[in-house]
Image (cartoon, rainbow, N blue to C red):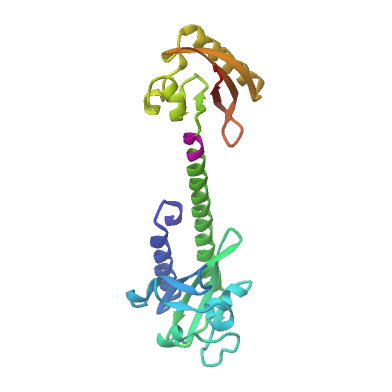
């Protein structure tokens, strides 16, 4: 339920550690994140660890630590007894906390590993198939959240880039709904009408230009909506300083599922 909310990622990772330690009845639980800078794994959230080690504690990747070995594995890894373990080396960080047994699973994000979720005990113990299923379920949930966060970050970066391009062009760019109301408009378009962008939002062409020009624009919008095509044409529009000729590219604006929402317009003043 927490994963479905807009909870901060660190809070979610911390809650995962709390739940994991409680359900598996272990002394420690932690999330190690794979770092791009040096390829090590850094402690990002934990239960049973000193607070000062969160964000600082590191373990190596590969067969040089349980977490590193887990990243190489196809499923959860069980450490039954540190004294007899031969698949991977025991990291100094694990030895410093007297860890004897543990279980770990990879946290995946978009086909790539974010890191490792694990739970450890200072006493020798076994982990059941239910324990394995539980840690895998929690790691899957974290992986889903990380994919969502990555998608949101990518969308935000794309939106930022698109906004930068739109606002830096002298062309007028705007989007209108099915009733002809402005949904978004760049400063290049708003300045043509002698207003700021925020003053144009929610208004129609009838509020900004003479009725004959607004009516011609509305007719062109309707034609585009009926055809569902992107078209380029010239149009005369009278604004405060006189009549201007614009080269206009206009097309349908749709939702992701294809639902028709309005029109988009790119207009360039070619009067000169």
Q: Which residue is drawn at 47% across and 35% down?
A: 167
Q: In which quarter of the image is residue 15?
A: bottom left
Q: Describe residue 96's horizontal placement relative to residue 72 as left or right.
A: left
Residue 76 in view (yes/no): no
Residue 215 vs 252, above or below: the answer is above
Question: What residue range appears in magenta?
Answer: 164-168
Residue in front for this viewpoint, 161 or 7: 161
Residue 38 vs 158, above or below: the answer is below
Q: Describe residue 203's horizontal placement relative to residue 64 as left or right.
A: left
Q: Which residue is farthest top?
A: 212
Residue 50 vs 211, above or below: the answer is below
Q: Position of residue 107 (x, y in %)?
A: 53, 66
Q: In which quarter of the image is residue 1?
A: bottom left
262 in magenta: no
Residue 155 in view (yes/no): yes
Q: Residue at x 46, y 30 (%)?
A: 186
Q: Position of residue 5 (x, y in %)?
A: 42, 51
Q: Which residue is farthest bottom?
A: 83
Which part of the image, by quadrant, shows the C terminus? top right
Residue 245 vs 165, above or below: the answer is above
Residue in front for this viewpoint, 208 or 3: 208
Q: Which residue is farthest front?
A: 272
Query: What is the number of callouts on the image?
Result: 0
Q: Position of residue 211 (x, y in %)?
A: 47, 7
Question: Magenta stretch mostly in which secondary structure?
Answer: helix
Q: Which residue is drawn at 33% across and 74% down?
A: 51
Q: Residue at x 61, y 61 (%)?
A: 111
165 in magenta: yes
Q: Where is residue 112 in the image (x, y as percent from the top left)?
A: 59, 63
């Amino acid at each position: 339920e927490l994963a479905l909310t807009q909870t901060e990622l660190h809070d979610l990772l911390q809650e995962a550690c709390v739940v994991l330690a409680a359900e598996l009845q272990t002394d420690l639980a932690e999330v190690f994140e794979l770092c791009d800078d040096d390829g090590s794994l850094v402690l990002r959230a934990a239960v049973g660890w000193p607070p000062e080690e969160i964000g600082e504690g590191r373990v190596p990747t590969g067969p040089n630590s349980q977490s590193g070995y887990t990243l190489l594995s196809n499923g959860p890894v069980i450490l039954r007894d540190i004294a007899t373990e031969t698949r991977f080396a025991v990291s100094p960080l694990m030895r410093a906390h007297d860890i004897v047994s543990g279980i770990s699973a990879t946290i995946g994000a978009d086909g790539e590993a974010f890191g490792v979720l694990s739970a450890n005990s200072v006493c020798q113990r076994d982990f059941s198939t239910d324990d394995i299923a539980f840690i895998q379920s929690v790691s899957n949930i974290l992986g889903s959240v990380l994919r969502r966060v990555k998608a949101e970050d990518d969308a935000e970066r794309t939106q930022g880039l698109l906004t930068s391009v739109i606002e830096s062009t002298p062309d007028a760019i705007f989007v209108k709904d099915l009733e002809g109301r402005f949904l978004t408009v760049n400063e290049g378009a708003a300045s043509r009408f002698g207003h700021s962008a925020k003053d144009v939002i929610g208004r129609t062409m009838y509020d900004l230009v003479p009725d004959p020009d607004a009516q011609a624009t509305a007719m062109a919008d309707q034609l585009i909506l009926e055809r569902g095509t992107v078209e380029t044409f010239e149009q005369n529009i009278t604004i405060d300083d006189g009549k201007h000729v614009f080269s206009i590219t206009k097309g349908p604006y749709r939702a992701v599922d294809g639902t028709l929402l309005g029109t988009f317009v790119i207009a360039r003043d070619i009067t000169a």
